[in-house]
Image: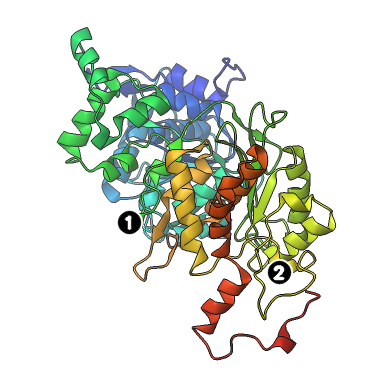
Amino acid sequence: MSQIVTPGLTREAVAIEALFHVIDKTTQQDVPFKLNAAQRAVDAAWSPRMLIPKARQRGISTYFLARAAIRCMGRKNTSAVVISHESEATERMFGRVKYFLDTMEGPKPVIRNNSKHELTFPKTNSVFWIGTAGSRKFGRGDTITDLHGSEAGYWPDAKALMAGLLQAVPKVGGCISIESTGNGMGNWYHNACMRAAKGLSSFGLCFLPWQDELDYKLTLTPEVAATIMENLRDDIEEPELVAAYGLNAGQLAWRRMVLEDELEGDLRKWKQEYPACLDDCFQASGGGLFTRIRFAETDRWKKDGQFMWRLEGHPKPGHMYALGGDVAAGVGQDSSVMEIFDLEDQEQVAEWVSNQTEPDIFGGHINRVGREFNRAYVCVESNNHGILTMATLRDLKYPSERFYRTPRATSRHAVKDDVKRVVDLGQRTTNTSKPFVIGLLRKVLRDEWTIHSQILKAELSSFIEHPDGEIGAADGCHDDTVIAAAMAAYIKTKAIVAMTGDTSREEGYDQEADVGSFDRILAELESRSARYPFPASMVDPNL
């Protein structure tokens, strides 16, 4: 393959545009293959491992089919495999590849074994195979240099299929691209995208929203356009979309047409098929609790190091910040998270996520980040691993007046040395306190705080009430960022009282804090089991 490189395009993309033709969707005429906006975005973001959640019909499968064909023709010993979700789509894709080769500019490649699913290129000793998910098992005995999965969100048993496919692709030199519209939560594709968004995966993430597609709009007269913009429809969330993404009247008109004529007004289906942001791709089947939040996508929200995202310009001198934390074991499962909010600008300003950080090390990170953000007010969920995190924070002498400590009323359970008692540090969540703190978060995200994180927005959308009445992440999903944000909301009042000197708000704060108090928890346990309350001999004042 030529070494010529066009600025902004990979070598494969240059060859695609130079050699291949496609059928124009509007005129149905044969035309040179020129990458559209979505294809150029993927080409610009290309990496050896890519996940591409997207809106419908952005041309991504066509791009990867052409890319695989170019590599088979120009690179020795290429083994390209493309897998679709259904047999009809497989046949269409294979026909598209043959069209590329039959109509290409210049001499046609030598092809043997031109079967229903396989093309071989003897001059380069390369092979191109296209099949349907589940029709053939791949594993350690196979070698795939270029793997593309199409509509992986709809594969049957995608987790098992991907396990075999990933074994077949070399870790060095192999290329994997997986694209799909969303298809619910908790499946392999959803989890893979969420891990990539958090930076917990070797896969890069390239999200393609519907509003970036130039064809997804109608041409309107100025009068009709003005009427649409003056009469935005609340029932289909048009004011929020205009505020968040600056949609114009032509885009809104096209959206109304598709939503009403093709999707029968099903807004949930619309978001899944035509997502505007990452979490739109993955719609919970249950009743989501966070149906109204203030979300604003911004270029100022940027990656800052391995674990952190930060809003440019923060921390600001003199501003007060609330830092909420959720603690995990650090063994690659759940994540330890910090969510930080500016209490004056009332917006999310930072997010820190890691699933490999041990609880005591996490305490050191909270100490560092909290001090950086003007000695932020800190509240950490202290259940399980959180106790060690809070002990570390205390030992590092983080200002004690700046982190939350569970109130302890005078009772038979009281301990004299209240400050040193580790189990009082942070906020416990129980069946009683969890609905309260989540309700508080729902209120501030609806009425006060603006968030910028796609990760938090996605986990908020998958936070549901289960059939048994429990609240939490949908099956197969995570809620670490939600709990961390709830902890920030929980300490908000104490921080504002300190910031403003408005002691009239202290009563409300004490009322909130009492929900998670030690005595309240013991009372709750006492109602469930004869083993509670603990005998006095079991209460160790040195904990």
From the viewer's side, name the closer residue of 26 and 103: 26
Tell me the number on the disc at residue 285.
Answer: 1
Q: Amino acid at mark 1?
A: Ser
| Rendered location of residue 213, percent (x, y) | 36, 24
Q: Is residue 280 above or below residue 516?
A: above
Residue 147 visible (yes or no): no
What's the residue at 53%, 39% (across, down)? 453
Q: Nearer the viewer, mark 2 or mark 1?
A: 2
| Rendered location of residue 158, percent (x, y) | 43, 57
Judged left or right of residue 357, residue 489 is left
| Rendered location of residue 217, percent (x, y) | 28, 21
Q: Amino acid at mark 2?
A: Val
> Splitting the image into 4 quarters, where does residue 294 fall?
top left
Q: Residues within 10 Å of mark 2 (few under 14, many from 20)?
A: many
What's the residue at 40%, 58% (across, down)? 464
* Residue at the far front in the pictured view: 504
* Residue at the far bottom in the pictured view: 530
Say if mark 2 contacts mark 1, CB within 8 Å.
Answer: no
| Measured Cα–Cα span from mark 2 to mark 1 | 37 Å
What's the residue at 60%, 65% (across, down)? 428
Q: Could you say whether the residue bearing mark 2 is in a helix, strand or loop?
A: helix
State the residue position of label 2: 423
Q: Residues within 10 Å of mark 1 (few under 14, many from 20)?
A: few
Judged left or right of residue 352, residue 275 is left
* Residue at the far top in the pictured view: 222
| Rendered location of residue 301, percent (x, y) | 58, 31
Q: Earlier in the sequence, mark 2 or mark 1?
A: 1
Q: Is residue 163 above or below residue 442?
A: below
**Count of marks, rendered view:** 2
Judged left or right of residue 376, residue 69 is left
